[in-house]
């Protein structure tokens, strides 16, 4: 019956049928009827219809996905083949993420069992409840921040939809609302990316790197991030002073990320609006403390922090920010987490109106390595 109905329709209609089936699957989940219809459409003589099926493969559960993907993976049309490959790759990445999640949860349970054996069930239970309260706090704060980004977008969408329904939507309405919505989406994307970075495990592989090279690249990354968001701190002078020949053993990308976050924070200490910066100076100094440790000092003469704000920042709780409008509150906690994963430490001192000093201490050598 399905095959007869499909043969009696024009191919643009059949293509629309795929979209309607996809919408139905998204709302109700796949059924035998919808899967059978998609199987018929996957054998359609028009490649445009087959590609539409390939574009919606990810909506299918594990049982139906490989069967339909197998029908299209060697399709005669290159566009269809590419769409299937993309779907398969995304499916595999999703499976890898789920597997990593399961491994992480298993590791946490193993660590908890060890902790319980070492310290007893009462202490272990108290530690778990503390962790759960911290988790609830972080999730609640993050949901609140995301809500603050989404609510204005929802208001703009409702306003535009109402004007469209009343047939009075004008170009001025779009020019008013769309830039605001775009800024909110960009803020939401920044937060999601920062959350993902914060949650990443630090790899155990380490390599010896030149401190000066890491700092120079981190500074360039910080400036690029600001420029990409339309914020140009050209009036802020950056001075870098690194002791000659200074090296340390790090996971390169994570060390870069940590230092870049700190330099970006220093630039933002001179922000007077979302796009404007006042003149000032940032100094980055790297020097050995002894044969086993070095310190990297990032100081600025920017606006500084009040005593209350400094106390809050020193909690290093992700999500809290003193930079209304452009900060996500994950930069400093992420930097601290990455530095501590290397056996280092991070401290911050600041005075309102006088600037901020961040001091990073890092080991020069790895455990067991001779200095």
Image (spheres, grey):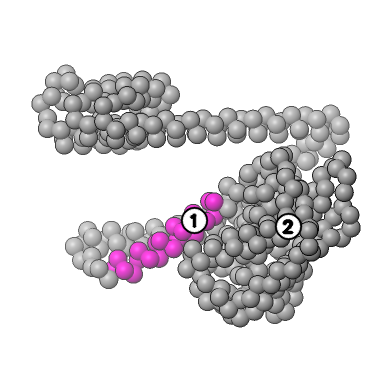
Is disc 2 placed on a helix, strand or loop? helix
Q: Mark 1, residues whose alpha carbon is within 10 Å: few (<14), some, or many (≥20)?
A: some
Q: Position of residue 232 (x, y in %)?
A: 52, 72
For the N terminus, the image quarter is: top left
Q: Position of residue 137 (x, y in %)?
A: 65, 51
Magenta residue span: 173-193
Q: Position of residue 89 (x, y in %)?
A: 44, 33
Question: Is any atom of residue 318 visible in this view?
Answer: no
103 with respect to 18 (left or right): right
* The disc label shown at residue 296, or none: none
Q: Residue at 87% of width from left, 49% of height from top? A: 371
Q: Quadrant of residue 221?
A: bottom right
* The disc label shown at residue 211, or none: 2
351 with respect to 85 (left or right): right
First in sequence: mark 1 vs mark 2:
1
Image height of 97 relative to 138, above or below:
above
* Residue for badge 1: 188
Task: Using the numbered discs, state the Cα–Cα distance from disc 1 to disc 2 in whole angstroms.
Answer: 33 Å
Is disc 1 placed on a helix, strand or loop? helix
Q: Mark 2, residues whose alpha carbon is within 10 Å: few (<14), some, or many (≥20)?
A: many
Q: Residue at 85% of width from left, 55% of height from top? A: 293
């Amino acid at each position: 019956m399905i095959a007869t109905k499909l043969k009696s329709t024009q191919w643009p209609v059949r293509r629309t049928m795929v979209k309607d089936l996809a919408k139905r699957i998204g709302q109700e989940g796949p059924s035998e009827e919808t899967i059978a219809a998609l199987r018929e459409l996957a054998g359609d003589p028009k490649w445009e219809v087959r590609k539409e099926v390939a574009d919606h493969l990810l909506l299918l559960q594990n049982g139906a996905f490989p069967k339909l993907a197998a029908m299209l993976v060697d399709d005669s049309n290159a566009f269809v083949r590419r769409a299937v490959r993309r779907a398969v790759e995304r499916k595999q990445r999703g499976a890898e993420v789920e597997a990593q999640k399961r491994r992480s949860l298993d590791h946490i349970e193993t660590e908890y069992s060890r902790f319980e054996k070492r310290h007893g069930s009462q202490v272990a239970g108290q530690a778990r409840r503390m962790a759960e309260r911290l988790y609830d706090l972080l999730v609640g704060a993050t949901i609140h921040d995301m809500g603050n980004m989404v609510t204005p977008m929802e208001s703009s969408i409702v306003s535009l939809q109402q004007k469209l329904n009343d047939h009075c939507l004008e170009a001025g309405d779009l020019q008013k609302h769309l830039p605001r919505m775009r800024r909110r989406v960009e803020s939401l994307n920044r937060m999601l990316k920062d959350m993902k970075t914060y949650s990443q495990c630090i790899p155990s592989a380490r390599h010896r790197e030149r401190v000066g090279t890491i700092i120079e690249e981190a500074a360039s990354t910080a400036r690029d991030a600001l420029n990409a968001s339309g914020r140009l701190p050209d009036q802020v002078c950056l001075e870098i002073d690194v002791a000659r020949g200074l090296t340390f053993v790090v996971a390169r990308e994570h060390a870069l990320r940590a230092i870049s976050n700190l330099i970006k924070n220093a630039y933002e200490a001179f922000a007077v609006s979302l796009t404007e910066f006042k003149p000032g100076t940032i100094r980055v100094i790297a020097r050995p403390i002894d044969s086993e440790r070095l310190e990297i000092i990032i100081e600025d003469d920017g606006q500084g922090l009040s005593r209350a704000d400094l106390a809050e920042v020193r909690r290093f709780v992700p999500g809290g920010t003193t930079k209304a409008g452009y900060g996500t509150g994950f930069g400093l906690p992420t930097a601290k987490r990455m530095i501590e994963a290397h056996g280092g430490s991070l401290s911050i001192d600041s005075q309102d109106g006088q600037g901020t000093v961040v001091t990073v201490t890092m080991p020069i050598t790895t455990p067991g390595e001779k200095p």
